[in-house]
Image (cartoon, grey):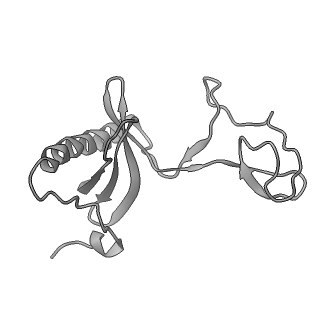
């Protein structure tokens, strides 16, 4: 697998842990968007794109946020004792949409993305800097000729 392009969108005034968003192209043929670069205790790391997990109302079947107390559709009181938890017992509120299958792939992605993030920080200090991530549409990921 070759990561043929990495695009970084730095978060302005990154007071929180979110440092940047990222898009990668694999083998000049497949794009993954909305990866996040997060500041961690041992440096930046890459979080895969994810979606919020939902629960269904036992009364009407409507999808509601996991922490909701009442159904947003019918008002029925929701039960919260079936909330999904990870191996350490922490509440799982999100699920990855795309993710590496093994540690070697994760390390390969992370190293390339973090290296590009650090290079983007340097480029951002230059006069006239414009992020390559801005205005990104599907046509922007077609192979360049």
Q: Residue 22: x, y in percent?
A: 33, 52
Residue sitting at x 29%, y 63%: 134
Asked whether 22 or 95 is in front, the reply is: 22
Marker count (numbered): 0
Give the left or right position of residue 102, taking residue 53 as reference: left
The residue under the point 78% across, 55% down is: 72
- Residue 25 or residue 1, whichever sits in front: 25
Left or right: where 36 falls relative to 60: left
Left/right of residue 57 with respect to residue 118 in the rendered view: right
The residue under the point 29% across, 69% down is: 141
Q: Where is residue 14 in the image (x, y as percent from the top left)?
A: 34, 40
Image x and y of residue 81, in percent = 81, 33
Quarter of the image that includes the C terminus: bottom left
In the displayed structure, would residue 5 be above or below residue 53?
below
Name the spot of residue 74 as percent of width and height, x first. Answer: 87, 58
Tell me the quarter of the picture where residue 122 sits: top left
């Amino acid at each position: 697998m070759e990561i043929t392009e990495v695009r970084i969108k730095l978060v302005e005034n990154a007071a929180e842990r979110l440092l940047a968003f990222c898009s990668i192209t694999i083998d000049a043929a497949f794009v993954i968007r909305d990866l996040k670069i997060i500041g961690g205790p041992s440096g930046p790391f890459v979080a895969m794109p994810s979606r919020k997990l939902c629960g269904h109302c036992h009364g009407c079947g409507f999808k509601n946020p996991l922490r909701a107390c009442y159904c947003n559709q019918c008002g029925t009181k929701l039960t919260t004792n079936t909330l999904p938890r990870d191996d350490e017992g922490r509440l799982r509120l999100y699920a990855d949409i795309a993710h590496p299958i093994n540690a070697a792939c994760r390390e390969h992605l992370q190293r390339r993305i973090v290296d590009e993030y650090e290079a983007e920080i340097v480029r951002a200090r230059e006069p006239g800097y414009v992020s390559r991530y801005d205005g990104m549409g599907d046509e922007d990921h077609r192979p360049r000729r």
